[in-house]
Image (tube, rainbow, N blue to C red):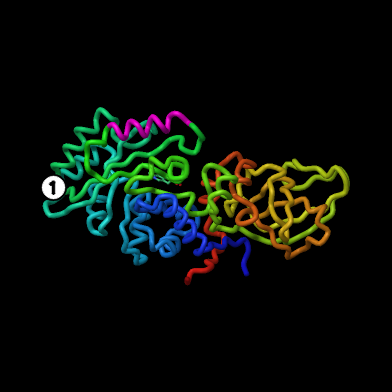
Amino acid sequence: MSFPLATIDAAALRHNLGIVRQLAPNSRVLAVIKADAYGHGMVGTAKALADADGFGVARLNEALSLRSSGVIQKVVLLEGVATPEEVRQAALHNLEMVVHSFNQVAMLEQVASGVQFDVWLKIDTGMNRLGFRGEDFPLALRRLQSCAAVRSLRLMTHFANADVADEPSTEKQLRQFESLVHSLSFERSIANSAGIISRPDARVEWVRPGLMLYGISPLGEASTRELGLLPAMRLITSLIAVRTLKKNEAVGYGSNWQAENEARIGIAAIGYGDGYPRTMRNGAPVLVDGSEASIAGRVSMDMISIDITHLPNAQVGSEVVLWGRGLPVERVAPFADTLAYELLCRVTERVAVRWENVYR
Ligand SMILES: Cc1ncc(COP(=O)(O)O)c(C=O)c1O
């Protein structure tokens, strides 16, 4: 077996999709698999989640790799198209698109007759990233409704703070969306994972889960447990060296961890070249042969050092888990001042991948 290794559990992905379905039984599920399915492997994830009602990706190149790998389900470009050539490619590969700007409306108005798209009109209700503001929405809607290239229309928005409990801006976003769309009969889509979990009123015709499909609640570890989500990725490696440090000796670049007493240090084969961030601080948890230990010293390109003084049986070849079942990535992320999202999708191609439970 080659280390480091990311194991991806297809059964966990299917289980987490089941949890989305339980929470939102009347919604269809657009599984968000952009950014290589948050580092899990986009095509493998699409195959594991074949029961989803469609897939959301950010960009055209992601959609094209799905199509070239034989994924035939609904695929939605969440950023829409950027050029007339992308419009042409979207038509060729039967892709749906978010339309969030008048530039994109104009591109659709210039499409050759006979070409048609299913369009998701995006309304900006406070995220202030993509979408038509309330005052521009009626015009955008009118133009798309009278555009020959638009076969069908859905209406969507995106939350900025749904992962924060009782955040008033979420309520405000929902109310604004409802006030704009309530008299219209289009299908709607509002909720990402945080919205699905925390806002039953956002579970409308379509939901758009990302993170929770991978087994992590954006509301934190307790919420992950409560919902019964199962992390799909386990990032593991092994110890390749063990050494004893005398009192006051330091380990690694910058010598930023010093032994207060004699210490055993395990060197594990993973580093920032694999996506384990250099910013990970001393004290970040790992599991060595199933027991918790912590990072001691700076992360280098190919290696980390771990204080295993309390684990006398740890030795060269011992398994080291960086995150996954038993060590939630959302617990590890704060030690690098980041989120589970970023840790998952920054795992590099140098890391071997092994799929598990692909066949039901
Ligand atoms: C438009 C849109 N919908 C849904 C999602 C999924 O979000 P999450 O991973 O928080 O569920 C994303 C991801 O950022 C997104 O950009």
Q: Does the magenta stretch include residue 181?
A: no
* Residue 297 located left or right of residue 232: right
Taking depth in this image into account, of 37 and 180 the one nearest to the observer is: 180
* Residue at the far left in the pictured view: 113
Q: Image height check: is 108 above or below 126?
A: below
Residue 82 visible in this rendered orientation of the protein: no
- Which residue is at the front of the view, 102 or 162? 162
Residue 289 placed where, x, y %? 73, 61
Query: Which range is magenta?
Result: 167-179
**Figure check: 13 above or below 253:** below
User: Residue at image x 35%, y 51%?
Assistant: 26
Q: Where is residue 316 in the image (x, y as percent from the top left)?
A: 76, 64
Q: Give the main secondary structure of the magenta stretch.
A: helix
Whether residue 18 can be seen here: yes
- Residue type pointed to by label 1: Ala
Q: Residues within 10 Å of mark 1 (few under 14, many from 20)?
A: some
Q: Mark 1 points at which residue?
A: 148
Image quadrant of residue 33? bottom left
Q: In which quarter of the image is residue 298?
A: top right
